[in-house]
Structure formats: structure tokens, C-alpha cells
Image (cartoon, helix red, strand yellow):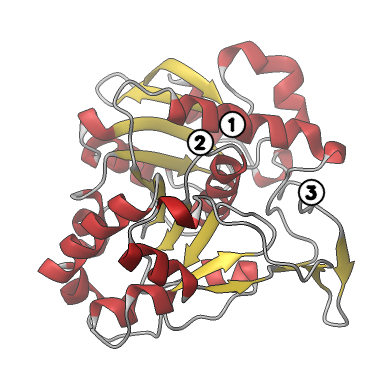
Amino acid sequence: MSKLVDMLRKSKGEIADAVAPLIEGEVRRTPEGTTAATSDAPPSPGTPISTLAPGEASLWARVRTIGLRLPAPSPLLPFENTHARASEQYRILRTRISQHPTHPSLIVITSPGARDGKSVTAINTAAAVALNSEGRVLLLDADLRRSAVHVQLGLPESPGLADVLAGAVGIEQAIVHTREFPNLYVMSAGAPRANPAELLDSKGWQSLCAELRGLFRYVIIDSPPIGGLADYDLIQAISDGIVLVLRPDSTNRDLCWNALQLIPEPKFLGLVLNCIPDWALGQHADSGYYGYLQKETPASAQPANSTPIE
């Protein structure tokens, strides 16, 4: 039996609930128990304005810069020295993405079901890539039914992706530039709509993705779970690569197997095992138990080509 399946069968008492809270840079506590950056000075953009075409320079001038407000405690943005283990794992994931032979640009982060940690993984992956990217990085919340990115980062829900696809706003109004990460931008899901699948099953979605490819070096997409909705299929169709997030104390075994079957093999970048305890690192670090992005062949469920990730 696969080691991955063994981990998925372990009880909740053996699994850590979440990684410790932290955020890069100096932070302060707000009365509501959130954290926010102390600096009010906006960072320099990821690409010098002088290198942009006149129209593109105008677009970036209209993008809002907003500081992040994280709930406390939170497993988000583990990039301080006091949490070197989690930080290093996300940096290794970043390296594997940047050096992947297919050079993926639009990367989907998904999971077999809810509560597996895909949104946290998408946020942390985008931030890690932005820390060492020579170009801009966009975190795009494409989960239009159960959006979470704006809540976890303390950003406005709207305008966002749904508003752009509905033609209510332009792309520059929906993008937010984060104050703490000079190269990181976020597009929230936007105001809830009754027809998210119709919004994604449109030429507008395809055109938007083509435009984002030209504006950003990487687009990290928080997608709905695999299999239950048409939304995921419409999102993955335009992507270059897919990362599947699993949480051993939460992921349903049958849903995990079905998800592995549904991911197109050429796009499958690997797995992220989320919320793995310290004892797994000590006992099984060489076998891919602790926080490893590891690729398994669906036919045999045997691990291959593993990459560390928290």
C-alpha cells in the first residue's frame, strides 16, 4: 500500500492542526487580533515603469496598494527566521516550480475536497515565489463559490475576478498590490454570483488569462476542489500545471484517488502534504512523509520525484 495512503488513514490525534503564525517584516497587533505592517511606504513595483509600454504603465498606476491584515494565529506567510523549517520548504517548492522543465506560468492549486488547506498553500506559494521573482506574481482566487483568500489576507472581497468577468470593472480595479511583498499582487474572487460556471465558461475568462500571462511572470490560482464542480475543469483547462494539496487528517481517501485520476498527466506537477507533524520529519524524512511535494502515478499510487514542501 502506498505511503501516501497510509498517511491519509492516520487519526486526527496524530496530526498537527496548523503551522505556526508569522509574517515577514515588522508587524503590529490590532485591537481585533489581526496583524498589519507598520510601514506605510509603498514598495517599488516588480518591474520598472520605464520598461513598460505607455498603456501598461498607466494600468499599474491605477492599481491599489494595500497592507495585509492576518488573523492571529495564522499559518500564513511563514518567512521569518523563527520558523525556518516551514520557510525553507516553501522556498524549495518555489525552486522546483521555477526550474520545472515545462516552465509553468499559470499554476492551479487544488485539493480533493474542502478543508485540505489549498487556499493557505496557494497564498504561501505565491508569496514564496514573489520573494525571489524578477517579475510580478499574481495570487488569483478563482474559487467563486467558497472564496477564502480575501478573508485570510484581510483584503476587500470586491471588486475581484467575478466582477471582471461580468464586465463590471476593469482588471486594474480588481488587482491589489500588497505593501509587504513588492512583487506580489492579489485578485480576490469578487462579489458572489449565481452563475460562477457560466462566468468561467466564457471567452472573457480565456481572454483574461491571456492578458494575465502578459502582465505577470507567475499566476498562482486558488481553484475549487477537483471533481465536484465544472468550475475546476474550466480553470485547469487554461493552466500550465496543477498542484494537488492533501491533508492526512482531513482528505477523504476515495476523493484523493479520484482526484489523481482526473488530473491530466502532462500538467501534474505533484502533491503537497499539508499539516504533517514533527515526528514524521524525524522518522520518515527520507521517504517523503514530511511536507513533500511528491508525484504519484495514479495507476500504482507509488511515489516518485519528490520535492519538499511544508
Seen as rendered, the residue at the extreme top is 286
In three-dimensional space, the C-alpha distance between marks 2 and 1, rounded to whole angstroms, equals 7 Å
Residue 88 in the figure: left or right of residue 308: right
Picture quadrant where residue 284 is located: top right
Residue shown at the point (16%, 70%) measured from the top left: 204
Q: Which amino acid, mark 1?
A: Ile
Name the quadrant of the C terminus.
Answer: top right
Residue 18 locus on image (x, y percent): 71, 49
Name the quadrant of the N terminus.
Answer: top left
Residue 84 locus on image (x, y percent): 79, 33
Upstream in sequence: badge 2 or badge 1:
2
Instruction: Name the residue tied to disc 3.
Output: 20
**136 or 47, which lies in front?**
47
**266 or 39, which lies in front?**
39
Q: Is residue 145 above or below residue 215?
A: below
**277 or 152, which lies in front?**
152
In three-dimensional space, the C-alpha distance between marks 2 and 3, rounded to whole angstroms, equals 18 Å
Upstream in sequence: badge 2 or badge 3:
3
Residue shown at the point (32%, 20%) measured from the top left: 101
Q: Which amino acid, mark 3?
A: Ala
Instruction: Name the residue tied to disc 2.
Output: 272
Q: Which amino acid, mark 2?
A: Val
Q: Is residue 264 above or below residue 25?
A: above
Residue shown at the point (55%, 66%) measured from the top left: 177
Upstream in sequence: badge 1 or badge 3:
3
Discs 2, 1 touching: Cβ within 8 Å = yes
**Which element type, helix, strand or loop, lies under badge 2?**
strand
Instruction: Name the residue tied to disc 1.
Output: 309
Q: Is residue 54 above or below residue 23?
A: below
